[in-house]
Structure formats: C-alpha cells, structure tokens
Amino acid sequence: MRVYSSMALVVYVVALLHHNAQVGFVDLPADGASALRRAVEIASLQALPWRGNSIGTHYWFGIADDYLLAPFLVGAGSLESVLRRGALFFALIAPLCFAIGAALRRPLLGLAFGLAIAGLPDVVALSSSYPLNYRTTHWALLTVLGAVLAASPMTDTKQRQAGTSLLLIGASLASASHPFGAAALLPAFLICGVTGVWPRGKLLKLSLAASGLCLVPYVIANAPGLWHSLFERGSDTRAGTSWVLAGGLDALRNLSKALDGLAGGPSSGLLLLAGIPFSLRSTQGRAVFSLCLTWIVLAAAIFVLAGYPPKTWHLRPGLYLLLALGFIGWCAVLPTGAQLAPWPATGHRTKLSKQALISAAGAVITLTFLLLQPPAIGTAATAPVRGFSQLSEAILDLAQGREFQYLEGQAHCPLNWSAEATLLDLQLRSGDFRLGSDTKAPVLAALQRIDSFERHPLATAEHELQLSNGLFFRLHWNPYPQAFRDQLRKYCPAQAEGARNEPFFLGGPGLGDLDNPCFAEGVCNPTLLMTGTEP
C-alpha cells in the first residue's frame, strides 16, 4: 500500500504542476465567476446554496461539485489563489487513472496511464476553461474505479462492497454535474445487480447519504422544468434528431483532437483505444464495458430526446470512459511482470521486486521528462489572472479604504473576463465581501481604453495603468454616480449608431440603469487595447 500511495503521489504532483501552470490563463465570464463566488461563499460559510448555475430557462447545475470544491478554497486571499486551489481539485483526475491500474494489480501500467493523463492538454484545460467543462470527467473515472473493484475476483467482499459504494456515489455525482450525466445511474445499478454486490452496513449508509445529498437538491431544482424541456421543445431544446446527430459528429471530431496531446501523438490514443476488445477477457473489463456502453447509449438517447446537439465538452466524459476501458483491456493481456503481485511468503503484504523497482523508476523518469513542461505562471506575463491582479491592487490603492460602488467596462476582445471576476478578487483581497456594492457611495469605474472615450471627458481619469497582459485601463473616482452613468451612456449608447460600433461590456454593482453592453466606435482597436497609444 505504501508503494501504491507513493506512485499515486508522483502522478498527482506531476498533474498539479501542469494544472497550476494553466490556471493563470483562465477566461472568467459571468457564469464562471458566479460559480467561483458560490464555492467561496460555501468555504467561508457565508451561504449554503442548494442549486448551481442556471442552464437556460428550466435547469440548474447540481450543487455537489461546489461543496466538494469549497474545502480547497478555505482561506484563499485572492482570485489567483482560488484558481490555484481549484487546480488541486482538477488534478485529481490523473491519480484516479493510476488507481484503476492499482485496482487491477497493474500499478506500473497505472503509473504510465496516470502520468500520460496528467500532462494531457485536454485534461489540463479543465483548470482554465472553468466552468464550461464541468467535473463529469472526474466522476466518470470514479465509476470505472468502482466497477473494477466491484467486479474483481481478487478482492474480499468488503472491498467489493466499497467498489459498489464508489460506483453509486460516482454515478450520483455525474448525474448532478450535468443533465446528460444522468445516463450514469442505470449502468451503475445494473453492475451492482449483475455482480450481486451491494453496499452493506456503514457503506450502505454512506452511499445513501452521499447520493441523496447529490441528487435530492438537484431533482427538486429541476423537476418542474423536466417535462417542458424534454417533451414540449422548450426554448433550450429546438433541434430535431438529424441536427442532434450532426452536432454530435462535429463534437466528436473536435474531441478526437484531444488525443493529439498524448505523448506520441494521436497514435498513442488509438493504440490505447485498440485495447477495448481485450477488455472482454476479464471480469472487471466486462463490467466496465457494460458501464461504458450503457452510459454512452443512454447519453445519446437523452441528447436526441432533449433535442440538444451536444458540444465537445458534453462528450468528453465518454472519451475518458473509452480510454480507461482500452487501458483495462491492455492490462488483461500484457504479461504479469508488469504488476506488483503479493508474495506467497508474506500473506497479504505487497513487496516491490527489484525488476519492478527498476521498471517503476524508468517509467517515472521517462514520462516525467516527456510530460513535465508547463510554463511557470510567475513568468507568464500575458496571463489574464496576473494582469487583472494588478488591476485589483490599483483599485484598492485608489479607494484607500473608502466605500464605493464598482463599475467595470471591457472590450472582451478576445478575452472574456467579467466584472464579477474582478469584484470577487477585490473582495477576497480586502476580506470584505460587501466591498464595491454600496449603491449610495461614489462610483469607482475601471474602463478599458477605447477610441470613443479619447475625444470626450471620459478620457480624464484618476489613474491610468497598463496590465502585464497588455490591456490598458483607466480608473475613475466620481462622487456623482448617476451623472457619471449619464455621461457614459451619452458616449456609449444602447444601440449601435454606425458600422464601426462594437459592443463594450459593462458590469458590477455600479451598473445602475446602464445597458449592457453599450456600443461605441473602435472598441476592439488592437493598438489602443494592447499599448495605450494612438494608431
């Protein structure tokens, strides 16, 4: 067990280095910032919400993922810190892959699989495209691990029961992470039924409690809109079957590019998938095969029923189910020399042979050199998180402890960073979660430099700064918020008045009666945005 733990730690550390290097390049639209705020509020015990972000008109994400993320965020003092802490959560995918190999008594193969996934850009991107990629991939791999343990002929009854507990909890978490994750529930129950193994005693209580906490709030939030969305073709479900299938094929083609990031390129991914037929040779492989097949077929049926063409990230969990299945297939046919088997003289204790030790060291060294190439966020000058950290510091310096209502204006060309993200960073840095929200206080406006404002009084600012990512901002302090908003409305109206007018996005508690977005000339002028100089 110590050997397994050491290997899992190696995989986790390698994965964490990659994820931490990626978090600085996150885009944070309003829904992403809202989800992070919700997790921060849970971590600081400010609120205990029972549903997540809204999905269109009739659905909400489940809340279980936010509660699981919250412990990682306790004590975080900035948005950058929150994102780094979140990487601790996202990086758990890689050790889950190793754990599947360990459960199959093929830890060295599991080490190679875990390290390959640890540096896979498609998985690492989960830390930078939050929350669009959800956490369903985590729970898909957790159900695979549970199925392997539940169907294993080499483990005792309690270990198999622990496997079914993981299987049921993982399926519940997957269901609450996204509407199409509900396809995980039926195969989880089928495997429990076929194997005849169900949680007992404390494991049963744990399974029921965890699954109930995941599913009950999710069902309560979404039950009223279920019929409308699935059967009445509501506002979010307009596509016919042919459109759904066409969208699924496009998403599948995009997702296949994820295999390009494996060491060795897409040929490595195809080789891994080629192990799927071999999975039928083992009891565990057949259980996971039925899990994957049933999950994917049911998910496709839900997409068709809902009339919703799947996006690339909707299919991502299915890809990793298949990669894990292919890995299990190769584990079933590769020589037993690649495993750590119990030595007869030591009963249940597991020793590491000299040959296995050499193999493990070689695998770690080789794959580390292949995969361990993340850029350091501290030297990544263009990282949005680092740039907007400078903006937050400048705002707090200008405020000097005074109350204000925050207003932000950005071009979003091409970066999608919301005012809600900056406000969360301000509040984390100050420790005051009401900062910037006093609607009776002066307005503190952070406006990105654009052409239209250069010829008007809005060009006059208290402070100007260029962020490390190249964006140019001006900070305004005005004790007459409505007069400032009226002036902004005059130079950035709600409707486009010319062919060159583009949307300028406004947000924050100081928005008041302003329209978002407003439209102005030269919003996406790259020279002004990146250098602050006239073209």
Image (cartoon, rainbow, N blue to C red):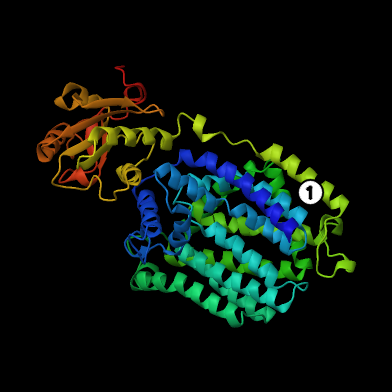
Q: How far across and down, in percent of the image, does residue 117 sit?
A: 64, 49
Q: Name the one closer to the observer, 172 or 502.
A: 172
Extreme residue in the right direction: 345
Q: Position of residue 417 (x, y in %)?
A: 36, 40
The answer to whether residue 135 is above or below residue 192 is above
* Quadrant of the rendering where the N terminus is positioned: bottom right
* Amino acid type, callout 1: Ala
Viewer-nearest residue: 94 or 76: 76
Helix, strand or loop at disc 1?
A: helix
Compared across the picture, whether 520 is left or right of 29 comes to left
Residue 310 appears in view: no
Q: Nearer the viewer, residue 291 or 403?
A: 403
Asked if residue 338 shows in the view, the reply is yes
Q: Which quarter of the rendering shows the C terminus?
A: top left
Q: How many marks?
A: 1
Residue that carries the numbered disc 1 in the rendered image: 360
- Residue at image x 85%, y 59%? 336
Quadrant assignment, res 328? bottom right
Is 375 rendered above or below residue 29? above
Q: Residue 278: where, in percent of width, then height?
A: 77, 62
Q: Residue at x 53, y 64 (%)?
A: 300
Give the left or right position of residue 95, taking residue 523 as reference: right
Image-based side of 494 in relation to 464, left or right: left
Q: Residue at x 42, y 74 (%)?
A: 216
